[in-house]
Image (spheres, rainbow, N blue to C red):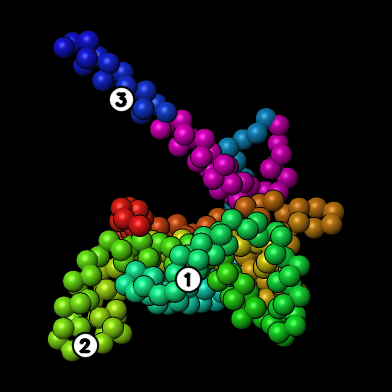
Amino acid sequence: MLTRKRRRLGAKIAVFTGLCLGAAFAGLPVVWMLSTSFKPNGEVFAVPPKLFTKNFSFDAYTAILSDGAQLRFFLNSYVVALSVTALTLLVAILAAYGFSRYEFPLKKSINAVIISVQAVPPITLVIPYFGLVVTLGLYNTYPGLILTHMVFTLPYAIIMMTAYFNTLPKELDESVKVDGASSWTALWRVLVPVSVPGMVAVGVYTFMISWNEYLFALTLTRTDDMRTVPIGIQLLMGQHSYEWNQMMAMSILGSIPVLILFLLFQRRFIGGLTSGAVKA
């Protein structure tokens, strides 16, 4: 008995130690990024490296927040990411309802196509999408970025919402139809309110994907007034010098929206992911 308790205690200590090491490994770059944002640019590569500086300053944040061009990057990211999230959720809910509640020809084939889109490397689609966006007259516009981002967010959203709807008994919406309501009413009055955890999980994931997207935001925009935050950070890399402290400050500011979203909806986010994984 004593040996078993010691083994359990040893296992718990080992797991706790492993988790602490993993957290330190994942968190150290963020801590260093935060530290660098408060340093003068000349101290970034000081030897030996210093986590804390005597010349603590908010100059990098002041430079970012007082620059209209930098603030425009944040506005663009918010417009694109929020639009992508809202439209992705709308389309995903409608598609998932159809996949979950109805049988129709080529259902399995369409599902296979949706899943296969996830396996295509985005880099291989840059040139085709660039040509398509230019042909449609959407180059350097919000709609061009929004529609392109949705191509990569919709497959996951449809898969997750379909899995979540599958966990809900069909009697829920069928009982409403018995009372004379339509399928549209059953969806929006019954299934959607019950599916809030799944929608939160999909929404947070979609927002993160769109907010952090770099490749297409660079390719499909031309002017600075259409650039997003990831491109804005890259633009701080000058020809002869890099504004490292401002780059780190902008990276911290760019991480805050996603962090706030996760902290606000943490329980619903995890609940939505686990519920959707129960039954496909």
Which label's residue is closer to the chain start, 2 or 3?
3
Apparent side of residue 117 relative to residue 102 in the rendered image (left or right): right
Task: State the residue position of label 1.
Answer: 106
Task: State the residue position of label 2.
Answer: 181
The kind of residue tagged 1 is Leu
Q: Position of residue 248 (x, y in %)?
A: 62, 52
Residue 267 appears in view: no
The kind of residue tagged 2 is Ala
Q: Quadrant of residue 272?
A: bottom left
Please say whether residue 40 is one of the residues in the magenta stretch: yes
Q: Nearer the viewer, mark 2 or mark 1?
A: 1
Q: Which mark is residue 12?
A: 3
Q: Tell me which residue sits at (72%, 54%) in the image.
A: 243
Secondary element under disc 1, as helix, strand or loop, is: loop
Q: Tell me which residue sits at (45%, 65%) in the image.
A: 108
Magenta segment boundaries in residue numbering: 19-47
